[in-house]
Image (cartoon, helix red, strand yellow):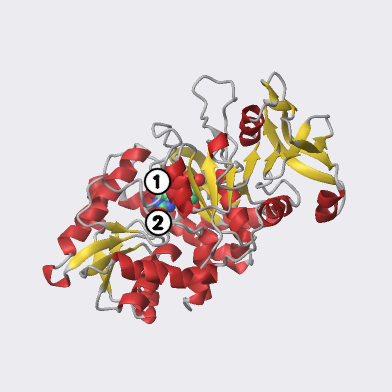
Amino acid sequence: MSTNYFLILDFGSQYTQLIARRLREIGFYSEIKRFDLSVDEIKKLNPKGIILSGGPSSVYDHGSPQRELKKLSPIAPLLGVCYGMQLMALEWGGEVKGGTSGEYGHQTIHWKDSLHQNLLGGDQQKVWMSHGDSVVKVPPYFRVTAISDSGSIAAIESDRMMGLQFHAEVAHTEKGSEVLKYFAEKICRAQPDWKTGSMLEKIKVEVLAATSKGGNILCALSGGVDSTVLAQILTQTLGSERVHCMFVDHGLLRKNEAEEVLNIYKKLGLNIRLIKAEEKFLGALAGIDDPEKKRKTIGGLFIDVFKENVRAEWNIAYLAQGTLYPDVIESVSLHGTGVTIKSHHNVGGLPDILPFPLIEPLKFLFKDEVRNLGRELKIPDEFVGRHPFPGPGLAIRVLGAVDKKKLSILQEADAIYIRELKKHDLYHKIWQAMAILLPVRSVGVQGDGRTYSYVLALRAVTSQDGMTADWFDFPSQFLRQVSNQITNQVKDINRVVYDISSKPPSTIEWE
Ligand code: XMP
């Protein structure tokens, strides 16, 4: 258990989650809340430190997210990152210049005092900037602690406050974690005490409390790591008689995946039932080509299938889901009305009214934390290291309307791709790899004949948490080999392309 709690107030930055990640990595438990969380709520959380995230707005924009920071500073030390620092400077009487020109991308900054220089091993630091507004005059009682190469104020500090114009949380900032550690240890005087290991006991206690009124749990298994870890925790905590696991084979899984996963579930000793519902899902999806509609249809059907198959004698009182932290955050938008990028991740595809109250014990964890839990629970490494796979399965990798034929073309091609990745020792270097069947056909030539067949896209990305991602730079020999094998072995594909888009601006999945 952690005694330190760091609160991150989200002013809308795409990097807010990374602040939480970095803090946890260096041993400080942290959670993200909306920027306008009430002072009373904040006091109840008893934070050791409060971080004001960056955000896309200018502090001078009409309707930009703002709050009275002077009510927060008595509660705990404050760290303002980018937009957060600008708000801080304004509130305490400094000056912020609205963005006519800013700093974007890599910059070098110079720390002015020996304390920072010692911690960072020198006065220079390569950082990632992304700002239009700049602090041009520091408030009274603050001092400038770092200046950027282009002469702008890069960091400020007072006794209990710190402002960073750069994003210490992104991987492009060298030694960014050291800067966050400085805030946590030197300014907030906290000692690191968070590790995933602390989490297992905490989750078990929470599960016991959440289910203490009696009744049993229906745990939906997807074949992925998250739901498997969840089922294992529930089973260990409550016993297999109370935890009814249901694995719905919606026909949208990878080739042979249903049987493979089922065997693992059985080995783990889960109380598992396999429901074959391929026809139902494919029937409902027939002719639907809008990605959001596909997701919603699948989410709705999952619930229907659960309802149809639950038996009264199981005495089910809760539905358990392996929702993770990025799912929760990405599904909530800053202003409550903002844009939903994709209705997504376990949560978004489900209908509003569920037949049972939902319990989501993993919803404060990141993927790598769940993988660590999996290892602690002795789930085989081969399974824990599997690439993430979306709930709607291959339905969102057959672009446009899905049918049985297209699915089996994709399954064959995908199986070759994944097999080759493993053979070449590349699988574990990649966060996620997938084949995508495009809804276009192109002309080719095979043997002496002209073909008019499907185009397949391959995607492989590196990522830390699925929030941002970069395409994987394969040796060209590998791509050549996979492309040959796919076009030779899968009759309906005559062309293979490789996706070289990062996230953002693309997403990992194509739909
Ligand atoms: P995107 O495509 O948004 O995906 O960049 C980020 C990560 O989330 C996974 N993903 C899903 N997982 N249900 C899930 O359980 C979904 O509906 C869903 N959509 C995307 C995706 O595979 C990637 O790991």
Q: Relative to 211, does residue 342 appear above or below in the rendering?
A: above
Instruction: Write down the residue under mark 2.
Output: 323
Question: In the picture provided, is 230 more to the left or to the right than 472?
Answer: left
In the picture, the quarter occupied by the C terminus is: top left
- Asked whether the viewer can see residue 383, the reply is no
In the image, what residue type sits under mark 2? Thr
Looking at the rendering, which quadrant does residue 336 occupy?
A: top left
Residue 16: x %, y % from top left: 56, 44
**Residue at left offset 16%, top offset 60%:** 308
Please tell me the numbered disc located at residue 344.
Answer: 1
**Does the beta carbon at disc 2 come under 8 Å from ligand 1?**
no
Residue 418: x %, y % from top left: 53, 62
- Asked whether the viewer can see residue 415, the reply is yes
**Residue at left offset 65%, top offset 30%:** 92
In the image, what residue type sits under mark 1? His
**Residue at left offset 12%, top offset 68%:** 312
**Does the beta carbon at disc 1 come under 8 Å from ligand 1?**
yes
